[in-house]
Image (tube, rainbow, N blue to C red):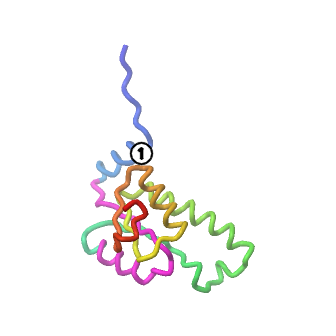
Amino acid sequence: MSYPQLLTPEEKLADAKKQLDLPHIVVICGSTRFMTEMTEADLRETAAGKIVVKPGCDLKSPHELWCDPVEVEALKVRLDDLHRAKIRLADEVLVVGDYIGDSTRAEIAYARSLGKPVRFTHPEVDPDA
């Protein structure tokens, strides 16, 4: 007797996105020092008909949500987990900026480990180029 092949969670997500006829989803990655450039990339990708997700918190800019140095460390962990979830959700990654730090390098490696295509606004900073 033959049993149907069970779908992986990734295959289920891809199938659901296809059934829902969702536009291409792009996640923006990069140092938050490039928030202005990320906003511009968001605008351009959205105008091209894509759903865009990007970092929502800039911990380099003062805000009451991350003014406590003890709590900010826990927040950083949660934000890293959230951004990895955004990468899993996306069809593609767009890396913004002309600098790649450790966090962005880890995000690129994670995306590539999932088989996600990765584009760069500055291709010369691609760690695998």
At which x and y percent is residue 58? Answer: 54, 78
Looking at the image, residue 96 lies above or below residue 86: below
Seen at 28% across and 60% down, the residue is 23
> Which residue is nearer to you in this view: 115 or 48?
115
Looking at the image, residue 89 lies above or below residue 60: above
Q: Magenta segment: does it hold 26?
A: yes
At which x and y percent is residue 72? Answer: 68, 73
> Which residue is nearer to you in this view: 30 or 85?
30
- Magenta-drawn segment: 21-45
Looking at the image, residue 111 lies above or below residue 67: above
Seen at 29% across and 76% down, the residue is 44
SS for callout 1: helix
At which x and y percent is residue 119? Answer: 34, 65
At which x and y percent is residue 78? Answer: 61, 63
Q: In which quarter of the image is residue 75?
A: bottom right
Q: State the quadrant of the N terminus.
A: top left
What residue does disc 1 label?
Answer: 10
Seen at 61% across and 86% down, the residue is 62
Q: Magenta segment: does it hold 109?
A: no
